[in-house]
Image (cartoon, helix red, strand yellow):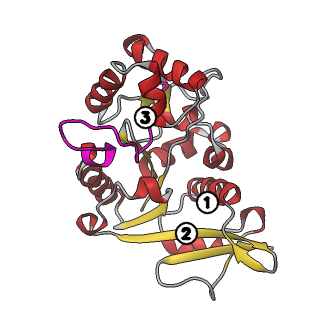
Amino acid sequence: MIAVISPAKSLDFESIAPCEISMVPHFQKDADYLASKLGKLKTSELGNLLGISQKLAHLNAERYSTWKTAQLKQALFAYNGDVYDGLDAKTFSLQEIDFSQKHLQILSGLYGLLRPLEIIKPYRIDMGTAFATPKGANIYKFWGDRITDQLKKRIKESGSNVLINLASQEYFSAINTKKLKARIITPGFKDMSNGKYAMVSFFAKRARGMMSRFIIQNSITDFEMLVGFDDSGYRFNHELSKGDNWVFTRG
């Protein structure tokens, strides 16, 4: 069983990673290629491409212009958004880090597919970015089915043909689900709001991280055990769940 999550725009390259083990990403050459192309853009062009402020455009233009000598950190500890707040990987034991390495994957616009201990450099580009390359008009076209092919191999290595989709729609759209040929369980998280259950983005992102943590800390390889997830008051909701779209609610 493999779980996939999205990356985060916010990064933490200041704190020291609690683990020294690291490895080179499978798609490192592709990441270097994209970074080199992005590094040739003017700051204003990069800002418009990414839809970010001038301040962030300058930051990322500098990142890409100094790419070859940039700082490195394991992906598991470098991303720093809502999902990763819920994951709280800095508190993992070495055994839990090892389990995450085998059962958690991070989708990335720049790196394609990352294992937790694969090292990344500071960057900013989303999977849905309309950045043209010889392979097509956007990042989805750049990756084609290569992410799917690699993920398929890793699912097979896990010993169970099940994928737990804890990624956002933007990132999960990079996967060709028909070609993947795996059973895909997609947990959803809803909170009580104005008398009915609704998805609240901030809480849902944190919950995806918390479920990833639940999988890792309990060494879960049987997807049916996910119904026991009860962190922060969430409970499996039989009535709202349909097929492999599993809904967890609270409130």
Q: Residue lying furthest bottom in this view?
A: 239
Report if the CB atoms under discs 1 and 3 are less than 8 Å apart.
no
**Residue type for callout 1:** Met
Q: Residue at x 40, y 14 (%)?
A: 65
Q: Residue at x 78, y 72 (%)?
A: 193
The residue tagged 3 is 49
Q: Nearer the viewer, mark 2 or mark 3?
A: 3
Q: Do the residues under discs 2 and 1 have CB atoms within 8 angstroms?
A: yes
**Visible residue check, residue 240:** yes
Task: Judge from the rendering whether residue 81 lies leftward or rightward of residue 37; answer left or right.
Answer: right
Task: Give the extent of the magenta segment.
Answer: 121-141
Residue matched to label 2: 187
Q: Secondary structure at mark 2?
A: strand
Residue at x 45% of width, y 55% of height: 170
Q: Is residue 198 left or right of residue 173?
A: right
Q: CA distance from mark 2 to mark 1?
A: 9 Å
Under tag 3, what secondary structure?
helix
Residue 28 position within the rendered picture, expressed as x and y whole percent measured from the top left: 31, 30
Q: Nearer the viewer, residue 92 or 121?
A: 121
